[in-house]
Image (spheres, grey):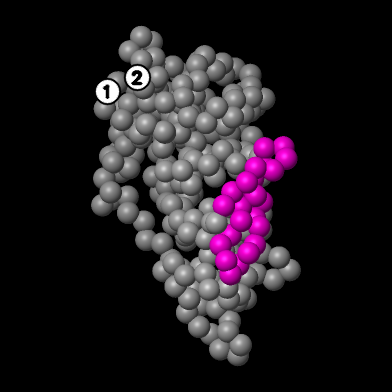
């Protein structure tokens, strides 16, 4: 299969290409396109590939704009920072969705799914248009995120508005930090459970231990091996590490 990657972060695109080669030797990446502009130019002069890997939010717009301008009947695997629960119900034939950073096991399953559908000739490109309409309509795609959390405060329970939370942190215990510096214990089994109910435009999963609010960030400084260190605003005065793998996603998330 001939494949094209549309991704505006060069590090992510190169990593995706390497991962594809590792899990599917029958898939040849023939082009990596870093923007809508370059993608438009490429599709004007080339036929659609057998498979597309597409980021959703590019530096110059949404990748869905390509479907308004070109007839792309090939299967598409979206590689996105959207939360999995928000798009789970919209999985359709021949299309899959990988959350960044993409794991090799998930990538292999997605390619196997596309390969199987092509072999059985049951890929229906019309379903892709339903997904495009979904993301293009803000009323239909509006997701309800959790508005408040009930935390332990002494011997009492107390509601804390989500917008007042600067940081979720998992250590020996699970903590919620508010912007005024208070720290509360909150009962959750995994950060994944919290991540699924938060607005991804406001909250970012920094690492295995922390989810940070964009409004809590004081500064960001580079660290060794392409890592980042996030300094949170006072009175928190905490430093949160961003891994090399997540650094490009973080930069894209904060610079929008």
> Do the numbered discs 2 and 1 sit on residues whose CB atoms are within 8 Å?
yes
Identity of the residue furthest to the top in this view? 45
User: Which label is found at residue 50?
Assistant: none
Total residue callouts? 2
**In this view of the protein, which residue sits in the foreground, 80 or 201?**
201
- Dot 2 falls on a residue whose secondary structure is helix
User: Looking at the image, can residue 170 be seen?
Assistant: yes
Identify the residue at image location x=44%, y=16%: 49
Q: Residues within 10 Å of mark 1 (few under 14, many from 20)?
A: few
Placement of 121 over or under 149, stated as above or below: above
User: Which label is found at residue 40?
Assistant: 2
Identify the residue at image location x=31%, y=30%: 65
Mark positioned earlier in the residue sequence (2 or 1) = 2
Q: Position of residue 132 (x, y in %)?
A: 31, 37
**In this view of the protein, which residue sits in the foreground, 232 or 190?**
232
Q: CA distance from mark 2 to mark 1?
A: 8 Å
Closer to the eye: label 2 or 1: 2
User: Looking at the image, can residue 16 be seen?
Assistant: no
Identify the residue at image location x=32%, y=50%: 141
Identify the residue at image location x=27%, y=23%: 69
**In this view of the protein, which residue sits in the foreground, 30 or 109?**
30
Q: Is residue 241 magenta?
A: yes
Q: To which residue does mark 1 refer? A: 69
Q: Position of residue 67 (x, y in %)?
A: 31, 27
Identity of the residue furthest to the bottom in this view? 155
- Dot 1 falls on a residue whose secondary structure is helix
Instruction: Classify residue 117 as left or right of residue 210.
Output: left
Q: Position of residue 228 (x, y in %)?
A: 64, 45
- Name the quadrant of the C terminus: top left
Q: What is the span of residues highlighted in magenta in the rendered image?
A: 219-242
Q: Residues within 10 Å of mark 2 (few under 14, many from 20)?
A: some
């Amino acid at each position: 299969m001939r494949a094209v990657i549309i991704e505006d972060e060069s590090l992510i695109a190169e990593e995706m290409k390497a991962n594809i080669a590792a899990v599917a030797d029958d898939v040849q990446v023939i082009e990596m396109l870093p923007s809508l502009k370059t993608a438009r130019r490429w599709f004007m002069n080339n036929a659609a590939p057998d498979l597309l890997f597409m980021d959703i939010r590019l530096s110059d717009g949404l990748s869905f704009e390509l479907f308004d301008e070109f007839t792309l009947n090939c299967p598409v695997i979206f590689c996105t920072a959207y939360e999995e629960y928000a798009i789970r119900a919209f999985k359709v034939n021949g299309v899959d969705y990988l959350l960044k950073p993409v794991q090799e096991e998930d990538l292999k399953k997605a390619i196997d799914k596309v390969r199987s559908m092509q072999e059985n000739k049951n890929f229906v490109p019309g379903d892709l248009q339903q997904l495009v309409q979904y993301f293009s309509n803000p009323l239909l795609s509006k997701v309800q995120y959790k508005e408040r959390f009930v935390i332990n405060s002494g011997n009492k329970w107390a509601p804390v508005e989500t917008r007042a939370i600067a940081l979720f942190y998992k250590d020996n215990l699970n903590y919620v930090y508010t912007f005024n510096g208070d720290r509360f214990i909150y009962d959750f089994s995994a950060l994944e459970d919290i991540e699924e109910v938060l607005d991804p435009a406001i909250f970012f999963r920094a690492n295995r231990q922390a989810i940070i609010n964009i409004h809590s960030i004081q500064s960001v400084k580079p660290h060794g091996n392409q890592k980042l260190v996030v300094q949170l605003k006072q009175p928190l005065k905490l430093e949160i590490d961003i891994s090399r793998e997540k650094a490009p996603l973080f930069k894209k998330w904060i610079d929008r």
